[in-house]
C-alpha cells in the first residue's frame, strides 16, 4: 500500500495529464484497428482503406492524429507512403487492456 502512495507523489500532474492524453488518443475503435493492423505489417493508405473498410477522409484523420502523437511513422517508397508503428510494444498495452476486460468480465 505504501508503494502506491509514493508512486502518486512521484508522478507529477503534468505526467498524469500526458498519460490521460495518450489513453484518450487511443480511445477510438478505428485507431485501435489501425494499430493492430500496422503491428502485422506496414501499409499504404489504399491498403488500409481496403482492409479496414473505411472512407478515406476518416482514415486520414485518424492517421494524422496517430502520426502527430508519434505513434506512427511513415516511409516513402516511390510514390507510395507506408505507415508503420513507431513503437510496436503499443500492441502489448492493448492486449493488456483486453486481458483486464476479460478479468473484469466486461467483454460481451
Image: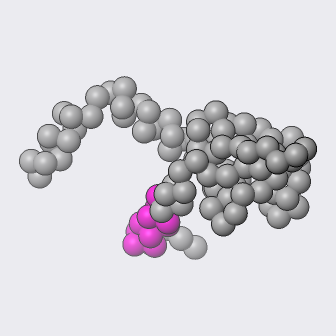
Q: Nearer the viewer, residue 21 or 102?
A: 21
Q: Nearer the viewer, residue 72 or 61?
A: 72
Left or right: residue 44 versus residue 40 is right
Q: Position of residue 81 (x, y in %)?
A: 81, 45
Residue 101 seen from this side: no
As displayed, is residue 82 above or below residue 64?
below
Quarter-wise, where is residue 71 in the image?
top right
The residue that appears at 62% across and 52% down in the rendered structure is: 85
Q: Position of residue 79 (x, y in %)?
A: 90, 44
What is the magenta range?
A: 93-105
Overall secondary structure of the magenta section: helix
The residue that appears at 77% across and 56% down in the rendered structure is: 43
Query: Which residue is the extreme one toward the top?
Result: 14
Q: Nearer the viewer, residue 43 or 57?
A: 43
As displayed, is residue 69 above or below residue 93?
above
Q: Position of residue 11 (x, y in %)?
A: 27, 34
Amino acid at each position: 500500500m505504501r508503494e502506491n502512495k509514493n508512486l502518486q507523489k512521484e508522478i507529477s500532474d503534468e505526467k498524469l495529464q500526458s498519460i490521460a492524453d495518450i489513453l484518450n488518443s487511443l480511445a477510438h475503435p478505428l485507431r485501435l484497428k489501425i494499430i493492430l493492423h500496422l503491428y502485422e505489417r506496414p501499409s499504404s493508405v489504399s491498403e488500409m482503406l481496403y482492409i479496414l473498410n473505411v472512407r478515406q477522409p476518416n482514415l486520414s484523420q485518424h492517421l494524422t492524429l496517430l502520426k502527430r502523437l508519434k505513434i506512427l511513422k511513415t516511409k516513402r517508397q516511390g510514390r507510395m507512403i507506408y505507415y508503420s508503428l513507431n513503437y510496436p510494444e503499443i500492441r502489448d498495452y492493448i492486449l493488456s487492456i483486453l486481458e483486464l476486460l476479460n478479468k473484469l468480465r466486461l467483454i460481451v
